[in-house]
Structure formats: structure tokens, C-alpha cells
Image (spheres, grey):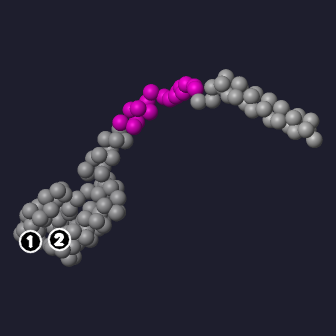
Amino acid sequence: MKINNFKIITIRNGIFLCAIVLSAFSYAQNGTLHINQDKDIEKLLALKKDMNSSEDASDRYRIQVYSGNRADAEASRSKVMTSYNNWKTSLVYETPNYKIWVGSFRTRLEADRALLKIKDKFPSAFIFKPKKQKA
């Protein structure tokens, strides 16, 4: 029995010693990374960044707070500008009405949050996406 225990302990110690020696010579975490990409990708990324930062992007959400005659539209616009000066407002003419649009929101969630604030003073406000303009 003692001889069998001695063999098991010797084998265990040998395996343990081999594992320690081999791990000292392994380089699993060392290495270099080379990325090969077309140089035009940087130009495309810069162009996309410029397009996304544009305030006039047609794929953004806006909030319409008023639609009607010009005098009331201008009054509503000044009210919006004094109450919510952190959002861009615009006066748009679509036959036969003048409309006041607020903001330029990337996501529907941003627009919903803004709408909750705007609904206090403009209960008929709603969110929409403008139609794309044909060139």
C-alpha cells in the first residue's frame, strides 16, 4: 500500500512540476495586432460623423407645437423660444398653414422625453419625422 501511495504522490508531483515549468515558458498573453484596412474607411467615417451631426438631417424626430396663421405662429414661436431655449425652433410654411417645429432628436426616446416637457405649455404638441426633401 505504501508503494502505491508513493507512486501516486510521485506522479502528482511530477505533473505539477511539469505544469509549472511549461507555464514559465508560455507566452499566451503576448502578441501584436496588425489591422489592415483601406485608407478610404477613415474618410467614410468622417463623412458619416458629419452627416450625423447635421441638424437638418431628415431622419430625425421633431415636435410640432403649432399649426395655423402666421401671427399666432410667431407668437407661439417666441413663447417656445423663451420657455425652451435649449432646442432649436423653426417656423415652416406648408400651404396653407405656418407650423412651429421644435428640436432635432436622434431617437424617439429623446423626442418622447422632450414632448413630456413641452406638453405642459402646448397640449396639442406631437412628434413626427419630416418627409425627405427631393433635390
* Among numbered discs 1 and 2, the one appearing first in the sequence: 2
Q: In the current view of this chain or complex, which residue is farthest to the top?
A: 25
CB atoms at circles 1 and 2 under 8 Å apart?
yes
Q: Residue at x 8, y 71 (%)?
A: 72
Q: Which mark is residue 9?
A: none
Q: Position of residue 3 (x, y in %)?
A: 92, 35
Magenta region includes residue 43 = yes
Q: Image height check: is 40 above or below 78?
A: above
Quadrant in the picture for residue 50? top left
Q: Amino acid at mark 2?
A: Tyr
State the residue in front, 134 or 31.
Answer: 31
Label 2: how many Cα within 10 Å (few below 14, some 14–19, many 20+) = many
Q: Which mark is residue 66?
A: 2
Q: Which residues are magenta?
A: 30-46
Q: Which residue is mark 1?
A: 72
Q: Amino acid at mark 1?
A: Asp
Relative to residue 57, is residue 89 drawn left or right? Answer: left
Label 1: how many Cα within 10 Å (few below 14, some 14–19, many 20+) = some
